[in-house]
Amino acid sequence: MASGPVGVFGGTFNPVHLGHLRSAVELVELLGLDYLNLMPCARPPHREAPDCSAEDRARMVELAVRDEPRLRCDRRELRRAGASYSVDSLAELRAELGPGRSLCLVVGFDAVAALDSWHRWRALLDHAHLVVIARPGWQLPAEGDVARWLREHRARDGAALAASPAGRVLVAELRPLDISSTEIRALLAAGRSARFLLPEPVLDYIESHHLYRRGSPAHDNTGN
Ligand code: ATP
């Protein structure tokens, strides 16, 4: 029976890239996860609505993980109405998994820097552990509420996360890959290649659906 720790990695994934995917595989192996769900955010509460639909972003995640059974796409935030709050998704996952199974929410350093703007951010640890992954160009907050809260709940290693269902914070140093969706969108909008920054099937999807190109219907409000 599958009963090991599981993880969920939320993001806009606009589009998903090798920075996300390599981190995801390394986390599965570092934490001994049974699986890690990549969970596209349908309506991000903290940023402008992405120029690419949630459906397209989810399909790209599905294409990216289709040959890696330990990674999955979790569409729950597309099915839910209203803003996509991580704490609501974690509560749903906790109800599905039962009270005893270890659940890890993965976030990057950049996301943690703004954690105190998240809806009911302290309640995240009621449902899951928090795994914070280093990201080139970003530091963990050194002072303030979030910094204190991270310190108070800090776990020594991954074993501490597997041993309990929720409530601890682990900082994971993975392979740094300086890739961002912003840069990929900018390359594509400029008519340049984004090859080898994201999986080929995702790039094929972007091309066949005319995403992120200047002047394409799905492109943001550049006025072109
Ligand atoms: P954008 O450039 O549009 O802000 P992004 O590349 O940061 O996008 P998101 O979908 O916003 O990607 O990120 C989802 C999660 O993945 C966040 O927690 C973010 O910190 C993390 N993340 C994104 N890119 C990397 C990377 N190269 N290495 C490690 N973590 C990353």
Image: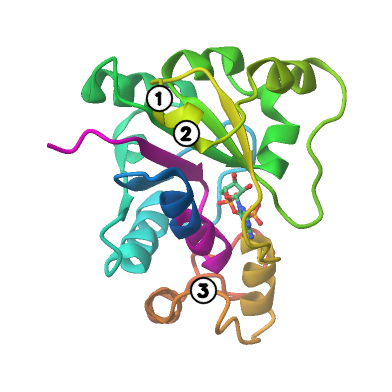
Residue 103 in view here? yes
Q: Nearer the viewer, residue 93 or 190?
A: 93
Q: Residues within 10 Å of mark 1 (few under 14, many from 20)?
A: few
Q: Residues within 10 Å of mark 2 (few under 14, many from 20)?
A: few
Disc 1 C-beta below 8 A from ligand 1: no
Q: Residue at x 49, y 57 (%)?
A: 26
Q: Looking at numbered disc 1 in the image, what kind of residue is underneath it?
A: Ala
Q: Residue at x 42, y 57 (%)?
A: 57
Dot label at residue 159: 2
Q: Residue at x 32, y 51 (%)?
A: 73
Q: Secondary structure at mark 3?
A: loop
**The quadrant where residue 177 appears:** bottom right
Is residue 116 shown left or right of residue 78? right
Q: In the rendered view, tell whether residue 117 sits above or below residue 55.
A: above
- Which residue has dot 3 on it? 198
Q: Secondary structure at mark 2?
A: helix
Could you tell me which quadrant the C terminus lies in? bottom right
Q: In the rendered view, tell whether residue 77 sits above or below residue 180.
A: above
CA gap, disc 1 and disc 2: 6 Å
Q: In the rendered view, tell whether residue 208 sits above or below residue 122.
A: below
Q: Residues within 10 Å of mark 3 (few under 14, many from 20)?
A: many
| 2 or 3: mark nearer the eye | 2
Could you tell me which quadrant the N terminus lies in? top left
Highlighted range, magenta? 1-24
| 1 or 3: mark nearer the eye | 1
Task: List x then y, in percent, for residue 179.
Answer: 66, 66
- Magenta span includes 22: yes
Q: Secondary structure at mark 1?
A: loop
Q: Nearer the viewer, residue 176 or 196?
A: 176
Task: List x then y, in percent, for residue 41.
Answer: 46, 41
- Which residue has dot 1 on it? 163
Q: Looking at numbered disc 3 in the image, what kind of residue is underneath it?
A: Leu
